Image (spheres, rainbow, N blue to C red):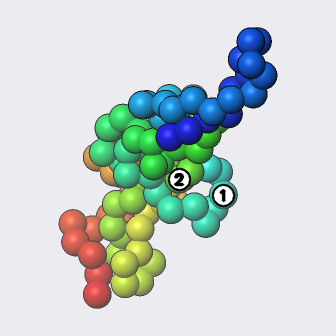
Amino acid sequence: MYELVWDEDVGFRYIYRTQGPKWNNKFNHDKDAKPCAAFNNGAAHNAFQLKGDGGCRFGHVCDHWVSDKGPGGKCLGSAGAKGHARDACDNPNRSDSRLE
């Protein structure tokens, strides 16, 4: 990944970063954002999931299957504890499998 940086000796130049940005604890708050796999799996964010400033491209909402939103319905934090991830889903309509 190349990044444009300021160098006092030569001015602007591109450098190659072997590591991407680090997560800055910010995420996409758009209601239409897809759920973040890192958030729901309790894993570290990878470079694909992060924007240049370190913010996550995805929503930090639960992606557990639910039975009240039709085929493929996901919790998305619509019920239960605020800010919960998949493993802590307490949505009363959670389902162990995807509805077809």
Above/below status of 17 relative to 32:
above
Mark 2 burial class by Cα count in 10 Å: few <14, some 14-19, many 20+: many
- 89 or 31: nearer the viewer: 31
Q: Is residue 52 visible?
A: yes
Above/below status of 90 relative to 14:
below
Q: Which mark is residue 66?
A: none
Give the x, y percent position of residue 52: 61, 40
Give the x, y percent position of residue 51: 59, 44
Asked whether the beta carbons under mark 1 and mark 2 sit within 8 Å of each other, the answer is no
Mark 1 burial class by Cα count in 10 Å: few <14, some 14-19, many 20+: few
Q: In the image, which is nearer the foreground, mark 1 or mark 2? A: 2
Q: Which mark is residue 58?
A: 2
* Whole-number angstrom distance, CA of label 1 to CA of label 2: 9 Å
Tell me which corner region of the image, top left, top right, bottom left or bottom right, holds residue 69.
bottom left
Give the amino acid type for the residue marked by disc 1 in the picture: Asp
- Check disc 1 and report its element: helix, strand or loop: loop
Most distant residue in the top direction: 8
Q: Say which quadrant the C terminus sits in.
A: bottom left
Give the x, y percent position of residue 66: 36, 69
Most distant residue in the front direction: 10
Where is mark 1, residue-wise?
Answer: 30
Q: Is residue 27 visible?
A: no
Residue name at image x 63 percent, y 33 percent: 14
Q: Give the left or right position of residue 52, taking residue 20 as reference.
A: right
Label whose residue precedes the other's in the sequence (1 or 2): 1
Give the x, y percent position of residue 87: 28, 46
- 19 or 56: nearer the viewer: 19
Residue name at image x 51 percent, y 32 percent: 16
- Check disc 2 and report its element: helix, strand or loop: loop
Q: Give the left or right position of residue 61, taking residue 71 as reference.
A: right
